[in-house]
Amino acid sequence: MERLDVIGNISRDLTRYPDHRGGSRLGGAALLLSLATTKAGRRAAPVSVLGDDLAHLPEAPGLDTLDWSAQIQAVGMSTTFDLEYDLQGELLAVGTDYGVAEGLTAHALRHVDQHPRGSYHVCCRRPLDVAAVLGRLTKNAADFSVDFFLPSAEAMIRAAASWLPRATTLFVNTAEYRLLKQAIDCGTLPEIVVTDGPRAAVVRHFGRQVASAIPPPHLPREVSGAGDTLAGTFLAHRSQGATTAQALAEATAAAARYVAAPALPIPAPRRG
């Protein structure tokens, strides 16, 4: 089974809710999606830039299941996100310092050129130059899927629009789906997975709904990263021969378990 190379950020996050949930945690779409993919049985490699503060992650317990061969380390601090949510899990505000991830585009392009026939997922978030990366993947005729992050989705969807019909799968939430429909004819897209929090997720092939699944009920503790978990699980199961409906059911269940579980702590560096 081919490895999934996940282009995106790995970050130190602070999540905040009105009921005092949240706190410091390890995050970043490339990390969380890679972990979900690996847990579902497919090898995954984050294509990311780590700063000095997270340089120890490849040896950290629980993270050593990932293939870390596609990450690089740079002098400076890793990306940080400050994420404020309401009680329903809707993102209200985000503060960001991209740190060494400013070098992600150059690293991703080098990696894609070195592995032109790889299988990729692109986390379309700042500071990545998505037009450059998707253009290179398309030129190489590589398989790739994509997802977005609502605060930057409108700009990222516009930047990516020319290449989206070449993507195997797009992952969006309902708000992002509305933005997508404004930018492109969704009937030209091979596969879109549309999520809606605790409500039914659906899959559309060239505009036609082919599957739906309602996540099993779980009391949410941490919603940040649920979409990454769903996407990684879905891609892993599809790559192993699951039907669209089977993969969606597994993915929604994995996302529901994720939101009910404790957040991923930032591991301390090993001594000695």
Image: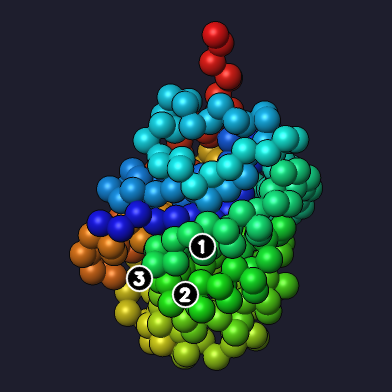
Look at label 3 and name its amino acid: Ser
**Does 138 sit left or right of 65 as displayed?**
right
Pick whichever, 168 or 260, lies toward us: 168
Pick whichever of labels 1 and 2 is earlier in the sequence: 1
Task: Indicate the quadrant containing the C terminus: top left, top right, bottom left or bottom right.
Answer: top right
Q: Do residues under tags 3 and 2 come within 8 Å of each other at their CB atoms?
A: no
What's the mark number on residue 140? 2
Q: Do residues under tags 1 and 2 come within 8 Å of each other at their CB atoms?
A: yes
Q: Quadrant of residue 148?
A: bottom right
What's the mark number on residue 212? 3
Q: Secondary structure at mark 3?
A: strand
Q: How many marks?
A: 3
Residue 24, how many percent across, how many down? Answer: 65, 31
Classify 10 Å Cα crowding around label 2: few (below 14), some (14-19), many (20 and above): some
Which residue is located at x 39 percent, y 67 percent? 117
Considering every residue shown, the one lying at the far front of the view is 114
Residue at mark 3 to residue at mark 2: CA–CA distance: 33 Å
Which residue is located at x 68 percent, y 79 percent? 158
Which residue is located at x 60 percent, y 84 percent? 162
